[in-house]
Amino acid sequence: MNFKKLASVLSKKKILILRTDGNGVQWAGDDVSMYELSGMPKFTTDTLLFCFGVNMSKKDSWLMEEADFPEEFDTSPELTSDLPIVIDENMIIISGSTYALLHTADCCFILPERYTIPIMTEQTHLFLRTMPITGEAKIIAREGMFVTAIFQPVNATEEITKWLEKTANAVR
């Protein structure tokens, strides 16, 4: 994971949620994302903001929280129910925001493109995973057998939905 790019992603909303899972591994993210921080020193929100280069006099402009890792999130290396996700080569830009178009064999999702930047390498693959306890769908990123990030699929705005429908009809 690119630590500088992670800082850039979280700086956009100025939200930092630091979570610790049952194995003592920390995850940093916002209301849409969580990125694994394994192999790094233990952080507090203050020390992580400092590492991101945030001036401590401006930390009050950030929404910060330290919490336990959600029990319902499954970070098992591979579940047989994981569905591979393809990232479309095309991106869409609406109201100045760039969205990645993601799809499985039978459904489509969008995700602000900036969320994939810190973790995407040739070894990174995205999957749709249904969380066993809640049945909620999450997008997970894996490098090999390791889950490196978890994302909440973003509901498409009406504007994006209309654009996708218009584009799909034009292709037919």
Image (cartoon, rainbow, N blue to C red):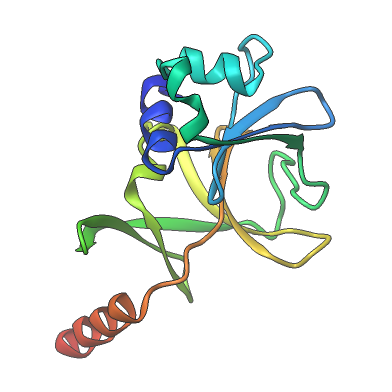
Q: Quadrant of the C terminus?
A: bottom left
Task: Answer above or below: position of 142 versus 92.
Answer: above
Q: Position of residue 69 (x, y in %)?
A: 76, 39
Q: Nearer the viewer, residue 38 or 55?
A: 55
- Give the quarter of the image for residue 150: top right
Q: Residue at x 26, y 56 (%)?
A: 97
Q: Position of residue 4 (x, y in %)?
A: 37, 21
Q: Residue at x 51, y 30 (%)?
A: 60
Q: Nearer the viewer, residue 16 or 129?
A: 16
Q: Residue at x 24, y 84 (%)?
A: 168
> Image check: 63 left or right of 27?
left
Q: Residue at x 75, y 67 (%)?
A: 135
- Give the quarter of the image for residue 123: top left
Q: Position of residue 143 (x, y in %)?
A: 53, 32
Task: Answer above or below: position of 172 versus 161.
Answer: below
> Image check: 79 left or right of 115?
right
Task: Answer above or below: position of 151 versus 137.
Answer: above
> Image check: 68 left or right of 62?
right
Count of numbered labels shown in the rendering: 0
Q: Nearer the viewer, residue 15 or 160?
A: 15
Toward the left, the furthest residue is 170
Q: Position of residue 82 (x, y in %)?
A: 63, 56
- Give the quarter of the image for residue 38: top right
> Image check: 25 left or right of 17?
right
